[in-house]
Amino acid sequence: MRAAADRLPIVTIVLLFVGYACTYFHRADLATLAPLWLDDGAHDGLGRALPDIASLGMLVYGFGKFAGGVLADRFGGRKLLVIALTGASLAEFAAAACTQPGTLAVCRVLGMASLALAWPSVGQVVATATPRARLATAMAFLSQSYLLGDATVRAVLAAVVAHGGGPPAVLRTSATALALAALVLGIGFVLVRHSTSRRGAAAAPAAQHIAAAAARTPRAPLAWLAAMSVALALVREALSFWSPLLLVESCAMPAAEAVRASALLPLAGGLGALAAGLLADRGPRWLAGLTLVPLLAGGLGLGLLGAAQWNLAGTLLLLAAVCCCTAMPQSLVSGVLPLRAGTSAGAARLGFVDGMGTLGSVFAAGGIARVRDATSMAVALAALAAVLALAAIAASGFLVAAHRTARASAAPPA
């Protein structure tokens, strides 16, 4: 029988999964609001301002993760995650009453600043409640929450619109869902902690196990992880934005069908992230195979996409393979690797690395657009392949540094 210290805290992980999935009620609302406001002549100013408001919100979101990690380490991830959902709910309620771009931008900034606390808080809770040897497994499952959250939220908001709901109804629906999620998480965390405190004797070995694992965990430089995070986020966001157009240009697909086909690509990324997390707990020797190999394979796939004309099946297969390959190292970089890079819980490290990736993704679509406009889609794909090559260099630096640190910590004292 597996020792208690080796078991995953399933109830806590489920609560975190649901809570982070619900953050997409704020993250995905603009995609629903844009066509409503653009079709409404009385609010076309709001519709035209949405791209700038979204970019501003993402900048705040990226920088906010730096502070979110520090705050999670200081005050605890459970409290901070409930605060994040509550703040986003209040921002959505306020946005429902906005009629001017300026006030909507303020609400968006406040909401995204609140949500910036969410992912570092999730990491802090996982790092303190889960044995280090099982961190990658826990983070692998939690990395799937964005797929479920994004898809579910878009379906719910689409149903609101289909039943005649306008922008205020969309925003109030999101606000109510976020408030309910905060309430459920708050009650759930209290119940879980009460149950855990009644098993104090059983919890002590788990704490000792975590402390012992932390003591022998090598410290690795965050600069390499941050560089990987920026590069991988840039490639992911660029592919997410440009994949429908690539299908239209390369395969002569109708635009509507291209959008539907590209919606399947994140599923390939989700499978890659899940596989990487499950395999990463097998030991440090697997890291090279889960970082360097997928990066090189993803770069090769992008090169093949740009170097030749492919039919629809070939193009979709290559795009899915690239998404799967890039998701494997990215899920590790934005999850388990920062948490394991030191002897503390690591929310501050996670917030820094993941925040750098978010900032990199802000400029992804626009940067590749400039390359494509000046040259061609093939050159733009080659540029993305070059970015993956830089990520592979950063991964090599991280692996070498981690190996040297591990050898130094294992050497007997002089």
Image (spheres, helix red, strand yellow):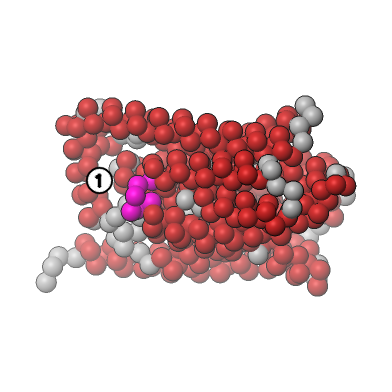
* Image point (71%, 60%), residue name: 52
Magenta run includes residue 391: no
> In the image, what residue occupies the spot 75% across and 62% down?
306
Decide which of 227, 146 is in the foreground and name it: 146
Residue that protrudes farthest toward the left in the picture: 414
Q: Quadrant of residue 134?
A: top left
Q: Nearer the viewer, residue 158 or 295?
A: 158
Residue 261 appearing in the image: no
Residue 177: percent from left, percent from top: 58, 33
Quadrant in which the C terminus appears: bottom left
Q: Is residue 64 left or right of residue 6?
A: right
Q: What amino acid type is highlighted by mark number 1?
A: Ile
Please state the horizontal and vertical placement of residue 229, each as a whole percent of the image: 52, 61
Q: Main secondary structure of the magenta part?
A: helix
Instruction: Pick whichever, 134 or 43, lies toward us.
Output: 43
Q: How many marks?
A: 1
Task: Work out whether residue 255 or residue 63 is closer to the camera in this orientation and state it.
Answer: 63
Write the residue at 53% across / 49% down. Answer: 115
Left or right, 337 with reference to 231 = left
Residue 155 picture location, percent across and down: 69, 33
Picture quadrant of residue 246: bottom right
75 within the magenta span: yes
Circle 1 SS class: helix
Magenta stretch, residue numbers: 72-77
Please tell me which residue is depicted at 51% across the width and 41% down the height of the picture: 85
Q: Which residue is mark 1?
A: 210
Q: Position of residue 331 (x, y in %)?
A: 50, 50
Is 239 above or below relative to 404? above
**Camera sees residue 407:** yes
In this rendering, the answer to whether 170 lies above or below 223 is: above
Please tell me how crowded label 1 is: few (under 14), some (14-19), or many (20+) other residues with Cα within 10 Å.
many
